[in-house]
Structure formats: C-alpha cells, structure tokens
Image: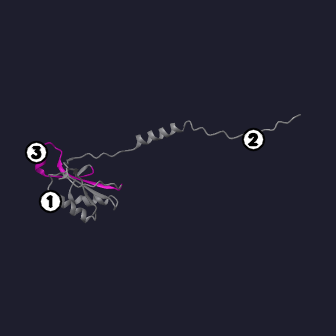
Amino acid sequence: MKRRIRKPRKTPAVSTASLPDIIFILLFFFMVVAVIKNQDLLVEVQLPVASELEEIKRSETVNHIYIGYPKISSTKSKLSGPKIQLNDAFAEVDEIGQFVRANPDNALTMLKVDEAATMGLITEVKTALRKANRLKLNYAALQGMKN
C-alpha cells in the first residue's frame, strides 16, 4: 500500500475586501463626532484696510479679541461706544488678563478692531495685555491697494 504524503497547508491570505468599508465607517464616525466651534460675533467689526499684510502661517494658539459696536440695530448702541468681546460674551478691560492667562504662554493675541473704534479703548486693551505679559500681538486687517 502506498502512503499518501500530505503537503503542509499554507495559512490562507487575510482578506482585505472589507478594509475600505471599515475606513469609511471610521471616517464618518469622526466627522459626526468632531465639534467645530463657531464663535458668534456680538459686535460689528469693519476691519481697516492695510497695504502691507503678512499672513500667520504658524499653527499655534490664537486668542481673538474683538472690539466694535454691538450688533443691536438701534442708534443707542452707537452712542454707548465700542465693546470688547471675549469668546461669546461682552467683557470689560480688567477681564482680559484672566482670558489670556487661560491659554498657553506662547499664544498669539489677535485684535480684530472696528475701524471706527476709539484709540483710548485699544490702548487700555494693550495695557491689560502688557500687564498679563502677553507681548505677541497682531492686528487683523483687509488687503488694500498699494499706492
């Protein structure tokens, strides 16, 4: 009698047919779960026009401070003067130090100031930032025509 010699069985290849499905399910899950924070502006900010602008290309934390007139459509809001907005609420100058200290020390501070805002309020904000030892300061502006 002849004996049959068995060949060793090879392990079957792993099927990758369902891999794209799994990747798309994970992608969809993270797209649904991710939260994108949109800040509601409570002030109107008409940015001034500048001829020399430089775009911030570093990906570091940026504190946005908005200064402008409230969006209430009454003339009373224009008479009350410009307001400061930190996050989603109005704030006073003495609250700025606490606001910027809540973020890392290397955070930039971006001032988005209405072109009709008073320089006195801007100076007070800059003084509060200096007291909080936040010296990296940028102003937002629109690109204008070169003369």
Residue depth check, mark 3 versus mark 1: number of the one nearer the observer: 1
**Image x and y of residue 104, in percent:** 35, 60
Q: Give the amino acid type for the residue marked by disc 3 in the picture.
A: Thr
User: What percent of the width, then of the height, locates residue 25?
Assistant: 48, 38
The answer to whether 12 appears left or right of 75 in the picture is right
> Spatial distance from mark 3 to mark 1, Cα to Cα?
21 Å
| The one of 105 and 7 positioned closer to us in this rendering | 7
Extent of the magenta region: 59-87
Q: Nearer the viewer, residue 103 or 146?
A: 146
Residue type at mark 1: give it. Gly
Q: Where residue 3 appears, x then y in whole percent?
A: 85, 36
Circle 2 residue: 8
Q: Secondary structure at mark 1?
A: helix
Helix, strand or loop at label 3? It is helix
Q: Residues within 10 Å of mark 3 (few under 14, many from 20)?
A: few
Q: Compare marks 2 and 3 and give the one earlier in the sequence.
A: 2
Q: Which mark is residue 120?
A: 1
Q: Earlier in the sequence, mark 3 or mark 1?
A: 3
Residue 45 located left or right of residue 25: left
Is residue 86 or residue 105 the one in the foreground?
105
Q: Is residue 12 above or below residue 128?
A: above
Q: How far apart in space, not on screen, are marks 2 and 3 (Cα)?
A: 89 Å
> Contact (CB < 8 A) between labels 2 and 1?
no
Numbered circle sitting on residue 75: 3
Q: Quadrant of the N terminus?
A: top right
- Name the residue rendered at 66%, 39% in the picture: 12
Give the residue drawn at x 60%, y 37%. 15
